[in-house]
């Protein structure tokens, strides 16, 4: 009990604690201090706290007593020292994951505070510090070869970018039918998820349409198994994005991930640290990676193409005959998602300016200048966060697929991931 008493006396956010190997109960004290630091860092970074549904007292204390970013970083570092370099041999393996989670999240918090204080990181250094991974560097030839495959898939006269845009224009959901198509897609994603994964009986979401944001869609988790899902109508919405966004933001993506964490860890274990979600942290790689891979979990193989062809294309008033070709194009574009990493790395490291970044997005993502400029605004705002969508998806896929080819085994692995404090280091 010596370590427990030591840590429980260190409740002030700025009081240094003597390094010691804590017992499981002592992690609660560190968790409360971690939440307080996250909420206080949110005062310096409006995008940092993505969700919070923990005790009102912690939020009130954070609002009342702010801290400079340097103090936040130093305090996080002191808590990391308490946790130590190794994980004690807790009897409960989930507690071992909790110990790693707190240490890794605190490290990212310290790094983000340092960034806000003026510290400069390269793209790769930032990705490692914030998301616990080093993204691979793919050669230009890799992206160029994928673009060449698109060139063959979309024949016709004129440059590929124009042909691609014309093809995608033919798959856009008319504005008057967006709501209907989205609600049908969400219902299908939810039904397919519930076939394999139980959800809290109270879970629900609200759907809103917005304009004027840098993102396509967003899930704002409110706690009590409730999400607000917003879709940005500034971006034209192709019919296949309905399944993308319905699964990614809803089922079995962000909404399910947050609800299962709340059920299993916040309510089930009383772990307060899971009631706050700092956006620029390793948790985001799991969140975005599982949300993207969740699309394939809900619609494996040809199931997605069949659903879009038979349900969504007719609802949108589009020709179902183009569903097959659209799926082939989409699959290549998903691989080209890694091009955002390449562009972000060069732009943030100063290898290209904004015009050069836009030109690369036009080259590899076949975007119009206006769409490329919007992508650049996202990179300017969220920086190396872009790796979480593609590298995160790849790491989650590899983790789940190690369970074998049996769909039931994969769903078990996927469900366990969504209910645990695992982070990128636990996927490799």
Image: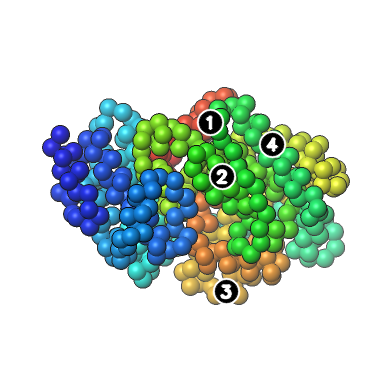
Mark 4 highlights which residue? 187
Please say if 97 is above or below 38.
above
**Residue 146 in view:** no
Please say if 27 is above or below 174.
above
* Quadrant where the N terminus is found in the figure: top left
Classify 10 Å Cα crowding around label 2: few (below 14), some (14-19), many (20 and above): many
Mark closer to the observer (2, 4): 2
Mark 2 highlights which residue? 227
Closest to the observer, 192 or 274: 274
Seen from this angle, which residue lies furthest left? 2
Marks 1 and 2: CB-CB under 8 Å?
Answer: no
Q: Work out whether mark 1 precedes mark 2 in sequence or the reverse, and give the earlier one.
A: 1
Q: Secondary structure at mark 3?
A: helix
Image position, residue 53 (x, y; %): 44, 46
Mark 1 highlights which residue? 200
Kindly identify the residue that appears in the image at 85 percent across and 59 percent down.
156
Q: How far is mark 4 from mark 3, CA to CA? A: 40 Å
Q: Secondary structure at mark 2?
A: strand
Mark 3 highlights which residue? 354
Q: Secondary structure at mark 1?
A: loop
Image position, residue 117 (x, y; %): 34, 69
């Amino acid at each position: 009990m010596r370590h427990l008493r030591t840590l429980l006396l260190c409740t002030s956010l700025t009081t240094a604690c003597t390094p010691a190997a804590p017992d499981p109960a002592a992690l609660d004290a560190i968790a409360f201090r971690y939440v307080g630091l996250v909420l206080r860092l949110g005062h310096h970074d409006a995008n940092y706290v993505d969700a919070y549904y923990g005790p009102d007292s912690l939020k009130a204390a954070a609002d009342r007593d702010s801290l400079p970013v340097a103090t936040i970083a130093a305090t996080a570092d002191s808590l990391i020292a308490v946790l130590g370099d190794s994980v004690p041999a807790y009897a409960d393996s989930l507690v071992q994951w909790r110990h790693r989670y707190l240490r890794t999240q605190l490290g990212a918090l310290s790094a983000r505070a340092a960034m806000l204080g003026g510290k400069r990181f390269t793209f790769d250094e930032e990705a490692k510090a914030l998301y616990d991974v080093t993204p691979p560097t793919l050669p230009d030839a890799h992206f160029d070869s994928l673009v060449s495959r698109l060139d063959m898939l979309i024949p016709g006269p004129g440059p590929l970018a124009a042909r691609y845009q014309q093809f995608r224009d033919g798959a856009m959901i008319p504005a008057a039918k967006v709501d209907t198509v989205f609600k049908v897609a969400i219902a299908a994603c939810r039904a397919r998820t519930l076939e394999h994964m139980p959800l809290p009986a109270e879970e629900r979401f609200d759907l809103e349409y917005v304009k004027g944001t840098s993102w396509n869609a967003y899930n704002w988790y409110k706690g009590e198994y409730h999400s607000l899902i917003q879709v940005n109508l500034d971006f034209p919405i192709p019919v296949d994005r309905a399944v993308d966004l319905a699964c990614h933001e809803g089922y079995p993506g962000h909404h399910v991930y947050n609800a299962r964490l709340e059920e299993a860890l916040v309510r089930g274990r009383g772990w307060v640290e899971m009631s706050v979600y700092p956006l620029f942290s390793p948790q985001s790689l799991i969140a975005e990676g599982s949300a993207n891979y969740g699309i394939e979990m809900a619609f494996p193989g040809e199931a997605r193409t069949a659903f879009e062809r038979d349900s969504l294309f007719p609802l949108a008033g589009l020709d179902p005959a183009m569903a097959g070709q659209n799926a082939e194009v989409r699959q290549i574009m998903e691989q080209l998602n890694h091009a955002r990493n390449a562009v972000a790395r060069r732009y943030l490291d100063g290898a290209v300016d904004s015009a050069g970044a836009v030109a690369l997005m036009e080259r590899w993502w076949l975007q119009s200048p206006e769409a490329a400029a919007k992508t650049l605004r996202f990179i300017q705002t969220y920086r190396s966060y872009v790796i979480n969508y593609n590298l995160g998806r790849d790491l989650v896929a590899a983790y789940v697929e190690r369970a074998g080819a049996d769909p039931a085994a994969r769903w078990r692995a996927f469900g366990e991931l969504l209910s645990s404090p695992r982070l990128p280091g636990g996927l490799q």
